[in-house]
Amino acid sequence: MSRPLVPGLIARGEIEEGFLGIVISRQLRELTWMSPHTVDVGATEVVSSGKENVVTALEELAADCHLLFTHDGDRERGKSDGVRYHSHYLVPVIGLGETERWPLADRGMWARFEGSDLGLLPSRPRDVDRITDPEAVLAATVPRRGKPVGDYLRYAGHNVDLAVLAQVPGYADWVAETRNALKALGYL
């Protein structure tokens, strides 16, 4: 018998919706493949919300999801407050930190696109944290084929190398917090 695991994401923009929703499910599958249980990781349920409606969005997702992820821009860099629990459902809420740079970590993935400009991408994945304007770097990197950036972000979500992403300190912290939440929920 398998155990379902449905993640929920509160998104604020294209990066969260097109990239993170996919990466979250992929990373959860990676984390749970050694589970003593068969874990059926579902697609990430995504709710778009501004800061003023986060609590409402959390409530909406908490009814159907086992883990919630939110862009937590209020956390100080490098100071994670760990997993929080939300509402009477006791659903773990994990802050994602600064995610805008994560799609830029895998040069190899972007190199597979004919016409991509890799000039502004850092040579080492961990150096994406030094990018001051990730939206401008992303816009300069994607090929000029008339497709919206969101199409490339969805592709990146499906194809980014998770081992490369793990070299980004903020991503590695997020994975560690997620692993701890999965242990607390009995998935690991």
Image: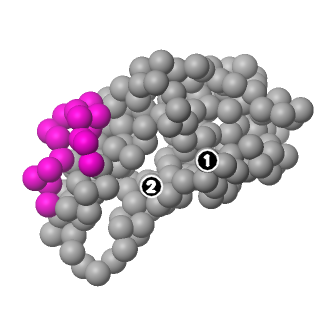
> Residue at 58% across / 19% down in the picture?
81
- Furthest toward the front, the residue is 52
Which residue was labeled with disc 1?
A: 51
Query: Mark 1 belongs to which amino acid?
Result: Lys
Position of 88 with respect to 67 (left or right) is right
Q: Camera-side residue: 74 or 185?
A: 74
**Number of the front mark, 1 or 2:** 1
- Furthest toward the right, the residue is 88
Element at label 1: helix
> Residue at 10% across / 53% down in the picture?
119
The region drawn magenta spans 117-133
Query: Mark 2 belongs to which amino acid?
Result: Ile
Assign the N terminus to one quadrant of the image: top right
> Residue at 84% across / 46% down in the picture?
63
Q: Camera-side residue: 30 or 10?
A: 10
- Mark 1 vs 2: CB contact within 8 A: no
**Picture coordinates of residue 114 (x, y %)?**
17, 69
**Picture coordinates of residue 122 (x, y %)?**
17, 41
> Is residue 166 found inside the magenta-colored segment of the image?
no
Q: Quadrant of residue 77?
A: top left
Q: Quadrant of residue 169?
A: top left
